[in-house]
Image (cartoon, rainbow, N blue to C red):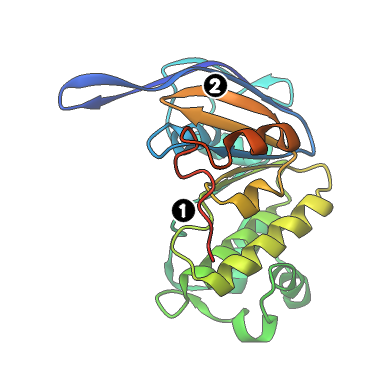
C-alpha cells in the first residue's frame, strides 16, 4: 500500500517559490488501478516523480508497504518494487532489447523468458529481441518495450506518466489493450497512471483529479468519471483520440 501524507513540493520560478503540490494526502491500496488526471500544470506528473524519488518533496511523508521511504533514494525505492515509466522513454544506443529486459529483471533472462514479456505487450519477439534501443524504434514501440521492462521487474507499484504522449492511434489502441490486461492480471501489483485520456480513465478502479497542486476529487471511477466528463472543470480530462 502507498500512503502520501501532506506532501508539499515547491519549485523556484523567476526567483519566486511556487507551490506545485499543496498538502497532498492520498492512499493507494494494493492491487488497485488508479488514474490521476486534471488540468495541465496541476502537479500530476510532479506527484508521480515525488513517489518514484526522482524529485524530493519539501515536506510530508511517503509510506510504502508500511515503511517510511521519504528519505530513500530513487535506487532504494526501485529495489523495494517501485517502477516508473517516463512520458518519453529513454533511448540507449548500443543496448539491445534483451539486454534492457535482463537489466530490468536483475537476472540473466533466457531468450524465451524475454520473449514472454515482449509478447505481453504485443510485440513479435523475433522482430525485437535483438533490436537496439535507438532511433530505429518508434515512440509506440519504445513505450511498449518500457512497459515490458516494468513487467520483467515484477514491481509492486508501477507508475506511468502520460503513456499516451507522442504515440499514434494504432499504438494507443495497443496501449489500452496492455493496460486492460495489466488490470485483469495484477498479481498484487498496484498501478498509477497519469493521463488525460477517457479510455484510460475508463479502465481505472479509482480516479484522482488534481488541479492547482491539490486533490479536488477522488473516488471510484463510476462516481467520478460522470462528474468530470464534459464539464468546464475537466480541462483536458476527457480529450479523445478519434
Structural crowding at the residue carrying mark 1, measured as other residues with C-alpha within 10 Å and reported as few (<14), some (14–19) or many (≥20): some
Left-right relation of 5 to 204: left
Of circles 1 and 2, the one toward us is 1
* Total marks in image: 2
Q: Position of residue 14 (x, y in %)?
A: 15, 27
Name the mark on residue 48. Answer: none
Closer-to-camera residue (203/194): 203
Q: CA distance from mark 1 to mark 2?
A: 24 Å
Q: Is residue 150 left or right of residue 180?
A: left
Examine the rendered structure and indicate whether residue 175 appears above or below residue 129. Answer: above
Residue at image position (63%, 63%) is 175
Looking at the image, which is closer to me, 142 or 162? 162
Q: Secondary structure at mark 2?
A: loop
Disc 2 crowd rating (10 Å Cα; few below 14, some 14-19, many 20+) is some
Measured from the top left, where is residue 107 in percent x and y?
Answer: 70, 59
Quadrant assignment, res 97: bottom right
Relative to 154, say whether 10 is above or below.
above
* In front of the other: 198 or 159: 198
The first of marks 1 and 2 along the sequence is 2
The residue lying toward the viewer, choosing from 195 and 105, is 195
State the SS at label 1.
loop
Residue corresponding to mark 2: 70
Image coordinates of residue 154 in percent, x first then y, are 73, 51
The vertical placement of 22 against 90, above or below, is above
Q: Kindly identify the residue that appears in the image at 48 percent across and 67 percent down.
A: 167
Residue located farthest toward the left when viewing the structure as drawn: 14
Q: Can residue 63 be seen from the camera position used here?
A: no
Does residue 55 appear to the left or right of 190 in the view shown?
left
Which mark, by number, is residue 87? Answer: 1
Residue 77 in sight: yes
Amino acid at each position: 500500500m502507498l500512503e502520501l501524507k501532506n506532501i508539499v513540493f515547491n519549485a523556484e520560478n523567476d526567483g519566486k517559490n511556487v507551490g506545485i503540490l499543496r498538502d497532498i494526502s492520498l492512499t493507494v491500496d494494493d492491487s488497485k488501478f488508479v488514474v490521476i488526471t486534471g488540468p495541465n500544470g496541476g502537479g500530476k506528473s510532479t506527484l508521480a516523480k515525488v513517489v518514484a524519488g526522482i524529485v524530493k518533496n519539501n515536506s510530508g511523508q511517503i509510506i510504502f508497504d508500511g515503511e517510511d521511504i521519504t528519505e530513500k533514494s530513487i535506487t532504494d525505492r526501485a529495489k523495494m518494487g517501485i517502477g516508473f515509466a517516463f512520458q518519453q522513454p529513454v533511448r540507449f544506443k548500443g543496448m539491445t532489447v534483451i539486454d534492457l529486459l535482463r537489466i530490468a529483471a536483475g537476472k540473466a533472462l533466457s531468450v524465451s523468458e524475454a520473449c514472454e514479456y515482449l509478447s505481453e505487450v504485443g510485440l513479435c519477439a523475433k522482430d525485437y529481441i535483438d533490436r537496439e534501443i535507438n532511433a530505429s524504434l518508434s515512440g509506440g514501440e519504445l513505450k511498449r518495450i518500457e512497459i515490458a521492462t516494468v513487467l520483467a521487474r515484477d514491481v509492486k507499484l508501477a507508475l506511468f506518466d502520460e503513456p499516451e504522449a507522442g504515440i499514434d492511434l494504432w499504438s494507443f489502441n495497443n496501449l489500452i489493450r496492455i493496460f486492460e490486461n495489466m488490470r485483469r492480471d495484477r498479481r498484487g501489483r498496484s498501478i498509477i497512471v497519469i493521463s488525460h485520456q477517457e479510455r484510460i480513465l475508463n479502465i481505472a478502479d479509482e480516479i484522482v483529479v488534481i488541479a492547482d497542486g491539490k486533490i479536488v476529487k477522488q473516488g471510484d471511477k463510476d462516481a467520478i468519471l460522470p462528474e468530470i466528463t464534459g464539464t468546464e472543470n475537466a480541462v483536458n480530462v476527457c480529450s479523445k483520440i478519434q
